[in-house]
Amino acid sequence: MYRNRVRLPGPLHVLNEGLAFLLEVVAIVALAWWGFTIGDNVLLHIVLGVGTPVAAMVLWGLFAAPRARFKVALPLVLLVKAVVFGAGALAFYGVGHPTVAIVFAVVVVLNTALATLDREAHFRATA
């Protein structure tokens, strides 16, 4: 189907995978930051500050992680990533950092697109 597959050289592959992991961590931190600062209720801070990132991690672990509990088709994996990363970007916006939100979203889209194409090329090469 794809004639020109994107396959990153070894060091760039590792660098891009490392960036993907860093972006996942940043999204979780942004969700916690948002949760702990939204509203005026201390209980709400605790529930959202802990619950939102935990929910994102559970969702990621079930469907999007490299060793996800459930192996699902690529479109669902990308949907889960869009939800978690989109929520992270919205969290940055929600705590008053719209520029960071936009930069984060752009880097996520580029990294995810490149990682998806690269993983496909690596998978096809080993199959």
Image (cartoon, rainbow, N blue to C red):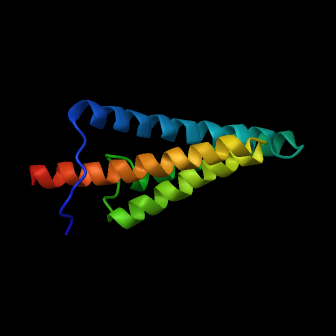
> 73 or 90, which is in the foreground?
90
Please give the name of the residue rendered at 20% of the width and 58% of the height, measured from the top-left corner.
4
- Specify whether residue 39 is in view: yes
Please give the name of the residue rendered at 41% of the width and 50% of the height, measured from the top-left corner.
112
| Quadrant position of residue 99 | top right
- Locate residue 110 relative to residue 44 in the image: left or right: left
Horizontal and vertical percent for residue 2? 21, 65
The image quadrant where one finds the N terminus is bottom left
In the current view of this chain or complex, which residue is farthest to the bottom? 1
Horizontal and vertical percent for residue 74? 34, 63
- Locate residue 86 relative to residue 96 in the image: left or right: left
| Quadrant position of residue 63 | bottom left
In the rendered image, the vertical position of residue 80 relative to residue 37, given as above or below: below
- Specify whether residue 57 is in view: no
> 25 or 15, which is in the foreground?
15
- Locate residue 95 relative to residue 113 in the image: left or right: right
In the current view of this chain or complex, which residue is farthest to the right? 40
Please give the name of the residue rendered at 33% of the width and 53% of the height, measured from the top-left corner.
116
In the rendered image, the vertical position of residue 77 relative to residue 7, given as above or below: below
Horizontal and vertical percent for residue 101? 66, 45
The image quadrant where one finds the C terminus is bottom left
